[in-house]
Amino acid sequence: MTEPDIFRALADPTRRQMLERLSAGERNATELREGLAISQPAVSQHIAVLRGAGLIEERKTGRQMLYRIRPDGLAPVVDWLTRYRAFWPERIDRLKTLLKEMDQ
């Protein structure tokens, strides 16, 4: 579950839709597929990518596999964003100053 793995998993709109559905609670593969124009094998592949990135986890109940969001799955991305969060305001402030100087 590295940053690149997470970003790669989130880059796909279908996987983002699946995560959105899981944000409401556990779902099985059939429920994740509802309304998506993809095959069951494609759903399985998307689930594998999300699981490999550490974004979801599974639990077996009877013959059914249920999927849910891993609460700490996005932690590496949050950490990455936090490192750059301070960078942008400083750059924007410098740009504003430069633009004001150019106007004068």
Image (cartoon, helix red, strand yellow):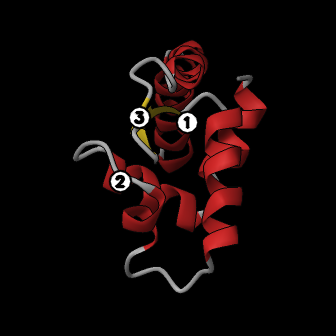
Identify the mark nearer the N-term, 2 or 1: 2
Tell me the residue that label 2 is attached to. 20
- Comparing 59 with 97, the one in front is 59
Residue extending furthest bottom? 37
Residue 11 placement: quadrant: bottom right
Instruction: Estimate the x, y position of residue 51 in percent, counting from the top left.
Output: 63, 36
> Is there a contact, CB below 8 Å, between mark 3 and mark 2?
no
- Comparing 59 with 54, the one in front is 59
What amino acid is labelled 2 in the image?
Glu
Instruction: Estimate the x, y position of residue 61 in percent, counting from the top left.
Output: 38, 37
Q: How much space separates mark 2 and mark 1, taking CA atoms?
A: 36 Å
- Sort mark 1 into few (<14), some (14-19) or many (20+) by Cα contacts within 10 Å: few
Left or right: where 96 falls relative to 12:
left
Q: Quadrant of the N terminus?
A: top right
Is 56 located above or below residue 71 in the figure?
Answer: below
The numbered mark at residue 75 is none
Identify the mark nearer the N-term, 3 or 1: 3
Residue extending furthest left? 24
Left or right: where 12 falls relative to 100:
right
What amino acid is labelled 3 in the image?
Ile
The numbered mark at residue 69 is 3
Label 3 vs label 2, nearer the camera: 3
What amino acid is labelled 1 in the image?
Leu
Residue at 46%, 47% in the rendered image: 63
Instruction: Estimate the x, y position of residue 99 in percent, counting from the top left.
Output: 52, 43
Q: Secondary structure at mark 3?
A: strand
Residue at 71%, 27% in the rendered image: 3
Q: How much space separates mark 3 and mark 1, taking CA atoms?
A: 39 Å
- Comparing 95 with 101, the one in front is 95
> Is there a contact, CB below 8 Å, between mark 2 and mark 1?
no
Label 2 vs label 1, nearer the camera: 2
Tell me the residue that label 1 is attached to. 95
